[in-house]
Amino acid sequence: MASDTDDLAFDVFSRQCPSRSTLEHATGRWGSLTLGALYEESLRFNELRRRVDGVSEKMLSQTLHALERDGLVLREAQPVNPPRVDYELTPLGREVAGKLLGLIHLVEGRMDDVLAARTRYDEARGGR
């Protein structure tokens, strides 16, 4: 059975394209950090919250729901008492996270250049 999207060409630059929201979920601050944190191992909610320093419980929950809906994260509830929920990347999530980690490592490795550029910019505009 063919789906309605089989013949569609996705274009993230079009406001109606569904890929735009997925890109936003994956590349937003909390989405990219969550995907990066899950790249090495599956984590429980509180482990993930500690790893992604600064994210609120509410924002992490919303982020995980969006990433799960997009097929990037798998939520696995363990039938134990007390309840245990693990989060891990799906194969698609691993692929996306791998690309994001490349960008993250590039930015981290070039921060000296970024900080120097900020200084030059601020000095040229009156020493912010």
Image (cartoon, rainbow, N blue to C red):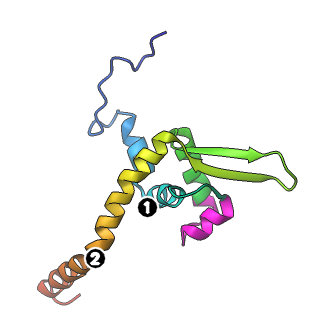
Q: Earlier in the sequence, mark 2 or mark 1?
A: 1
Give the dominant element type of the magenta stretch: helix, strand or loop.
Answer: helix
Residue 128 lies, in percent from the top left, at: 23, 87
Q: Report the residue at 42% width, 17% height from top.
A: 4
The outermost residue toward the bottom is 127
Element class at badge 2: helix
Q: Which residue is mark 2?
A: 111
Disc 2 marks a residue whose amino acid type is Met
CB atoms of marks 2 and 1 within 8 Å: no
At a point 48% along the width and 45% down the height, the residue shown is 93
Nearest the viewer among 5 and 76 is 76
Give the magenta part as a residue range.
45-59
In this view, the residue farthest toward the left is 124
Residue occupied by mark 1: 29
CA–CA distance in space, label 2 to label 1: 17 Å
Q: Is residue 124 above or below residue 66?
A: below
Horizontal arrangement in the rendering, residue 65 relative to residue 7 (left or right): right
